[in-house]
């Protein structure tokens, strides 16, 4: 809520909804969302880019595929795990068969031992966007990595490039510490160099330690000295709305639009979600499904361990699902392939809990993102596709939009339902259900070395 106005679609063509009067219109028999395009203010029309996000397990990829078929679109992934080759099941990567007719970008571009960042994603995703537009197609960016999408939309900080000499020096400083797993000393090194936020880094995030030292050596100041474009733009919007809060809603719209002229494209952003208890049920079941069959997430986690990657030491091994699976299999290897039913179910519960908590963090993150229009993913897929296609063509039906809107905040009843929520497994219920997995662990993990 922003000073009495709920922003349900905050993009280069801005849709504002008043609390008292949902959609201003002159003819109730022809309800159309009225938009005021800011493109006329900048004397040029910006290319449109569709952005689809939502919590894990909600159905983003399925929606993006249908949109691409309808609009002649190409899909750009915004998932921090799907960039890695071989991490297919745990990242819910779109099946190869479904990618045959629709070009996909930023899938399978890295080896699992390589690091990735929001800055690298920005460069790659923007390049892909330009390529798609150059061919006359529609870029459809889809994923749930909030930071990646924020940088993609607003831009990355203007941090100076680091020379090969600086990169080599930093690698030399950290090589021994990382090989010993001496994280605390590495944090102290970054603190002494001048980055007061080093304590806030996630443990074993060696990439950010390395990058922090590189920036200080290259610029003489820590990374926090470089403002994020998102923070700057958000500050402008809030400041301008504060100044204009005593004037008309049209003036408020103009102040928001003038800030949005800094964005490079006409972003049409949609966040799809469903009732939290229904979402949690989907997530819990999907975690179970990732464990079924011979090539599930456990097989992928075992492959990572076989390469010498330890749990929670790289971007890939910190990912939800892979971290829990690798830690579980690592313990099994220490016991020469032995695991009890209790230990398996404890791992499954940890996997499900981590996944639900991740979805909760995604909801919180995007609740504070002003560009996104929230849509109800429990509605028929065709209905969602039609609305987004119509929005792309500037002809979205206001009455249809009302039926698709989902609340950003849970109601009191939904909150009580969440408090009572308990996982009810579908596939792994009795002790016999996990017997095939325990046998697989006994056969494949007992002879593996633990380093």
Image (tube, rainbow, N blue to C red):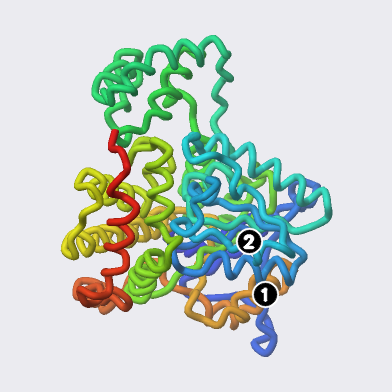
Apparent side of residue 133 relative to residue 54 in the rendered image (left or right)? right
Determine which of the numbered discs, if any, sits on residue 379 in the image.
none
The image's mark for residue 396 is 1
Q: Position of residue 151 (x, y in %)?
A: 54, 42
Depth check, front residue: 6 or 140: 140
Q: Is residue 15 above or below residue 32?
A: above
Judging from the image, what secondary structure is the residue with disc 1 in? loop
Q: Nearer the viewer, residue 360 or 339?
A: 339
Q: Residues within 10 Å of mark 1 (few under 14, many from 20)?
A: some
Q: Is residue 284 left or right of residue 38?
A: left
Q: Residue at x 67, y 62 (%)?
A: 99
Picture quadrant of residue 383: bottom right
Residue at left offset 59%, top offset 53%: 77
Residue corresponding to mark 2: 96
User: Along the polypeptide, which appears first: circle 1 or circle 2?
Assistant: 2
For the question of whether residue 412 can be seen, the reply is no
Q: Which quarter of the image is occupied by the C terminus?
A: top left
Q: Position of residue 310 (x, y in %)?
A: 34, 38
Horizontal and vertical percent position of residue 35: 67, 65
Q: Residue at x 20, y 60 (%)?
A: 346
């Amino acid at each position: 809520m922003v000073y009495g106005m709920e922003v349900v679609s905050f993009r280069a063509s801005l849709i504002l909804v008043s609390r008292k009067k949902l959609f201003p219109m002159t003819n109730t028999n022809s309800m159309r969302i009225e938009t005021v395009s800011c493109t006329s203010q900048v004397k040029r029309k910006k290319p449109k880019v569709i952005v689809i996000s939502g919590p894990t397990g909600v159905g983003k990829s399925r929606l993006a595929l249908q949109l691409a078929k309808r609009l002649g679109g190409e899909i750009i992934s915004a998932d921090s795990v799907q960039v890695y080759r071989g991490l297919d099941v745990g990242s819910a990567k779109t099946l190869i068969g479904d990618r045959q007719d629709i070009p996909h970008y930023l899938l399978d571009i890295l080896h699992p031992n390589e690091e990735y960042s929001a800055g690298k994603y920005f460069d790659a995703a923007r390049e892909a966007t330009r390529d798609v537009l150059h061919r006359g197609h529609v870029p459809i960016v889809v994923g749930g990595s909030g930071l990646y999408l924020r940088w993609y939309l607003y831009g990355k900080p203007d941090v100076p490039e680091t020379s090969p000499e600086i990169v080599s020096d930093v690698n030399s400083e950290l090589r021994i510490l990382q090989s010993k797993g001496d994280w605390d000393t590495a944090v102290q090194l970054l603190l002494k160099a001048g980055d007061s936020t080093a304590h806030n880094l996630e443990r074993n995030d060696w990439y950010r330690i390395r990058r922090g030292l590189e920036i200080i050596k290259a610029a003489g100041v820590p990374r926090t000295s470089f403002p994020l474009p998102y923070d700057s733009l958000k500050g402008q919007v809030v400041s301008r709305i504060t100044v204009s809060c005593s004037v008309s809603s049209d003036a408020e719209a103009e102040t928001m639009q003038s800030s949005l002229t800094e964005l490079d494209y006409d972003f049409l952003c949609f966040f799809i979600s469903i009732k939290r208890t229904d979402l949690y049920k989907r997530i819990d079941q999907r975690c179970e499904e990732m464990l079924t069959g011979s090539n599930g997430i456990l097989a992928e986690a075992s492959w990572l361990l076989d390469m010498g990657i330890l749990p929670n030491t790289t971007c890939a091994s910190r990912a939800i699902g892979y971290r829990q699976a690798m830690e579980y299999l690592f313990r099994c290897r220490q016991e020469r392939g032995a695991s009890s039913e209790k230990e398996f179910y404890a791992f499954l519960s940890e996997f499900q809990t981590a996944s639900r908590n991740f979805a909760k963090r995604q909801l919180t993150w995007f609740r504070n993102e002003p560009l996104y229009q929230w849509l109800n993913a429990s509605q028929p897929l065709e209905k969602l596709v039609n609305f987004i296609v119509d929005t792309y063509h500037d002809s979205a039906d206001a009455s249809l939009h009302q039926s698709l809107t989902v609340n950003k905040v849970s109601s009191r009843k939904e909150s009580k339902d969440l408090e009572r929520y308990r996982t009810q497994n579908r596939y792994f219920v009795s002790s016999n259900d996990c017997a095939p997995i325990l046998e697989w662990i006994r056969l494949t993990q007992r002879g593996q070395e633990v380093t």
